[in-house]
DNA sequence: CTGACAGATTTTGTATACGAAAGAGCGTGA
DNA sequence: TCACGCTCTTTCGTATACAAAATCTGTCAG
């Protein structure tokens, strides 16, 4: 399993145990092993990870603040589950934040454009393989976007995008893109590289906005087609 | 002291003790009693609040995820301190998010326009008093903005704005507005009410953008004038 | 006088213990 | 048969205890 491609702000570098619990639980949520609605019993998690309940509780509290789990008094934590409305909110926000960040990145002087181009090329390479490796493609995609967010020079903006975009979407998106949409998406990446290389913030921002829009369209298709893959499998819910 | 005008997402409704610790510490940070850079010793906080270290640690972890405090392994927590660059980032984000939310609110049908107008009028009333009550004005201002964010219909957006805007600015802003700026700000509130009443998203969004810009200008003035009020008092730092 | 080392002290990290609340199961009575 | 209430079990919330890391202090060598 891929570990923690980009952990948000509050990331516990804390104690060994807390940090381990945080990463493990977060990974399992993002990968879908812990489905939405699943109740998180502290004893179970403690036994699974091999630490006591204390670090488990601290990890869960961080995850709650990030919105990945919810907490109710005397009833413990459970994995947040997402509806179409949530996805709509998320894409609305990404469509606002990422183009803005891209415009900033175009003129900040912080962007390593060759590194970005390399990531885009690696993605092209990855989808030309006969058998698509979704993990790899997703990871490259995350790195591509994060490189731009980072080059915006606005650290807080980058963290917001990460926390918004980690809604299970990202990890699963590319497995559901149609081949045509996937190609288009990668073409947009190449155009993002070019626009950023030119240093024109207006162009770069516009391309990113289109890129976000395509993502939203694809996501909607996916959601209507196979809603169950996103929602929790009802059999697993509430044990 | 004002308690928790608007607590973000992860707000521990948790145990009595954890919740109490969270609110207390958060209030003291936002009000400036705990200055930026101040080291937060768990025992001290536990003694002050009258609970054990466990709920203190959980509260601190939530606050860390929200960015109000930082954490370093085996060195504990300390209050985040803000620079002009942080304020610039925050205003950049608010200038993006709040106008967007305002445009949404203009057409969502969720806005109680009369209630909003009442808040704006109450603010007008409050500044016509001979002696300005900054606490009251700030509280009304928070409620005004939050009402619009809520009416955007995008819950996640509202939470982002809260978490971004809670950077000590808001609580202290109105004490430093020049009388002219303060009047202008309240006039903008009235115009926001009118634009929202008309249901024109373009107008409403534009007014909010101007409003944000004025806030930024005022903040810059304040910062250059009296930098020390925002930064931690060096005498108190690191005890 | 300065700097560095060693021991003592403080502070954090984690485990464990205990009380309290919620939930499940069972029996009784209508 | 169904509903109600009681007990028993599970799970959470908090306090406390102990271990590990960091920090402080005082002393001694240079």
Image (cartoon, coloured by chain):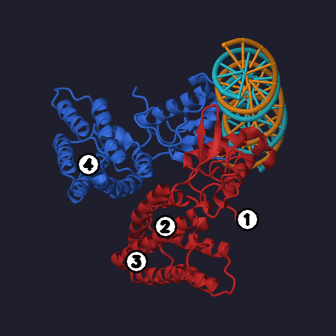
Chain colours: A red, B blue, C orange, D cyan
Mark 3–mark 4 Cα distance, whole angstroms, equals 34 Å
- In the rendered image, residue A20, in percent from the top left (x then y), is placed at 73, 51
Mark 4–mark 1 Cα distance, whole angstroms, equals 49 Å
Tell me, for residue B218, which label it has, or none: 4
Indicate which disc, 1 or 3, sits on the residue closer to the N terminus.
1
Q: Are marks 3 and 4 on the same chain?
A: no
Mark 2–mark 4 Cα distance, whole angstroms, equals 42 Å
Which tag is nearer the camera, tag 4 or tag 1? 1
Is residue B34 in view?
no
Marks 2 and 4 in Cβ contact (< 8 Å):
no
Q: Write the residue at 49% across / 67% down.
A: A220
Kindly identify which residue carries mark 3.
A207
Mark 1–mark 3 Cα distance, whole angstroms, equals 32 Å
- In the rendered image, residue B101, in percent from the top left (x then y), is placed at 33, 53
Q: Are marks 3 and 2 on the same chain?
A: yes
Q: Write the residue at 33% across / 46% down.
A: B151
Image quarter of residue A130 = bottom right
Marks 3 and 2 in Cβ contact (< 8 Å):
no
Q: Nearer the viewer, residue B8 or B218?
A: B8
Kindly identify which residue carries mark 2.
A220
Marks 1 and 3 in Cβ contact (< 8 Å):
no
Indicate which disc, 1 or 2, sits on the residue closer to the N terminus.
1
Indicate which disc, 3 or 2, sits on the residue closer to the N terminus.
3
A100 relative to B156, above or below:
below
Mark 3–mark 2 Cα distance, whole angstroms, equals 20 Å
Q: Which SS class for mark 3?
A: helix
Kindly identify which residue carries mark 1.
A1
Q: Are marks 2 and 4 on the same chain?
A: no
Q: Which SS class for mark 2?
A: helix
Disc 2 crowd rating (10 Å Cα; few below 14, some 14-19, many 20+) is some
Q: Nearer the viewer, residue A149 or A223?
A: A223
């Amino acid at each position: 399993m891929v570990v923690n491609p980009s952990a948000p702000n509050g990331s516990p570098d804390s104690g060994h145990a807390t940090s381990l619990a945080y990463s493990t639980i977060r990974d399992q949520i993002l990968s879908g092993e812990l489905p939405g609605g699943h109740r998180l019993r502290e004893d179970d998690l403690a036994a699974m990870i091999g630490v006591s309940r204390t670090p488990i509780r601290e990890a869960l509290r961080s995850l709650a603040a990030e919105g990945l789990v919810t907490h109710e008094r005397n009833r413990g934590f459970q994995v947040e589950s997402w509806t179409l409305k949530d996805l709509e909110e998320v894409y609305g926000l990404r469509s606002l934040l990422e183009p803005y960040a891209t415009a900033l990145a175009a003129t900040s002087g912080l962007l390593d454009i060759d590194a970005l181009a390399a990531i885009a090329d690696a993605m092209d390479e990855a989808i030309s393989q006969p058998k698509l490796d979704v993990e790899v493609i997703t990871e490259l995609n995350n790195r591509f976007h994060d490189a731009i967010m980072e080059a915006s020079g606005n650290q807080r903006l980058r963290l917001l995008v990460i926390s918004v975009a980690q809604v299970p979407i990202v990890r699963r998106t590319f497995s559901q893109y149609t081949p045509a949409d996937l190609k288009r998406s990668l073409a947009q990446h190449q155009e993002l590289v070019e626009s950023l290389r030119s240093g024109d913030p207006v162009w770069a921002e516009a391309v990113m906005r289109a890129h976000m829009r395509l993502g939203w369209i694809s996501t909607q298709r996916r959601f209507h087609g196979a809603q169950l893959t996103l929602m929790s499998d009802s059999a697993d819910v509430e044990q």
